[in-house]
Image: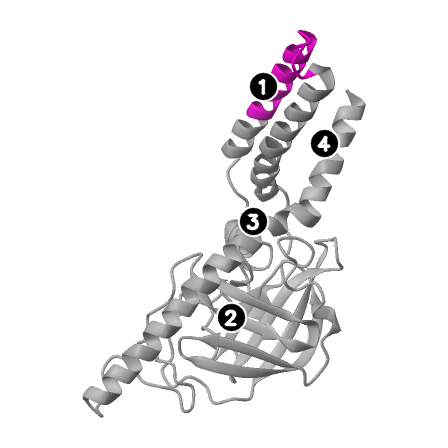
Amino acid sequence: MIFACGLLILLFVAYQLWGTGISTHFHQEQLRSEFNRELAAARHATTTTTAASPVPTTTTTEPDSGVAQPVPGDVPADGQPVGTIDIPAIGANYVVVEGTTTSDLQLGPGHYAGTPLPGQPGNAAIAGHRTTYLAPFFNLNELVTGDPIYITTTQGRFRYDVSTLEIVSPSDIAVLNPTPTPTLTLTTCNPRYSAAQRLVVLAALVSPPAPQPIAPATPPARRSTGRPTASASTVSHALAGESGSAWPAIGWGAGAAALTVGIWLLVRRRPRRLGRVGWYALGALALLVVLFFFFQSVSPLLPASF
């Protein structure tokens, strides 16, 4: 029993470090295709509008971007692509989705709801995992002042230059406060393999901002001192993620237990066609598949970490 529990824990650790990247890679491919279609549609709309009339309608174009500008309020739905983030200094290039819940961050870096979209005036904030789910921000600590960060949205391609790196508490949502100048804030867990702190990278917009701001949701509440105050649930939506439902984990756990018992009973009968080793091998493969989905449903129940 102790051996089985130890093996299960080792398998779960392996899933966290490598298995999570399998589903995230699949989702990233889908999101990139979806975002590329949105870019193509935006460019087509811009071309059509320009050819039909010189008077702007619902879209405009950022100079030299060739990409249409959405109207204010055109914010992507939760889990949908916001744009791409490219950080050449650390070799990171991912599709950013809207939202920072646990399920959102399993898809890729997530844009904090309530902050402006990248390229807009104010403080646009993005969170990403450091050691799991493809670890998009694994080497974020290696950035130095002046390193460029490129964000591409349907409003254009924007360049930010890194200005500073900070280490804060997971409950310190002051880094999400509005800023007087266009800023990009990236957050991830610190140190690696721990959720004790948050590494925060601040970058300043150096390319022209998008001309039409998209209205965000209500920004984080602030005390009179300028530091934010929020309930535990608000904080979980900010720098610490959000937990999921336990029912999927219970279901997959019951399925894994039932399959284990079934394999044991089957092997006890000692079928002649495959033999004990053969049935154990087939059973182990089936059990690994079930355990993959079990671990996937357990991850959102753990203390949230980036």
How far apart marks 3 and 1 lie (CA) works out to 25 Å
Which segment did they paint magenta?
254-274
For image coordinates 63% across by 42% down, the residue present is 302
Tag 4, which secondary structure?
Answer: helix
How far apart marks 2 and 3 lie (CA) works out to 18 Å
Residue 84 circle label: 2
Residue type at the position of mark 4: Leu
Tag 3, which secondary structure?
Answer: helix
Task: Name, please, the residue furthest toward the right.
Answer: 3
User: Which of the marked residues, 3 or 4, is nearer the chain's N terminus?
Assistant: 4
Q: Which residue is mark 4?
A: 8
How far apart marks 3 and 4 lie (CA) works out to 20 Å
Q: Which residue is mark 3?
A: 23
> Alpha-carbon neighbours of circle 2 within 10 Å: few (<14), some, or many (≥20)?
many
User: Which is nearer the eye, 269 or 60?
Assistant: 269
Residue type at the position of mark 3: Ser
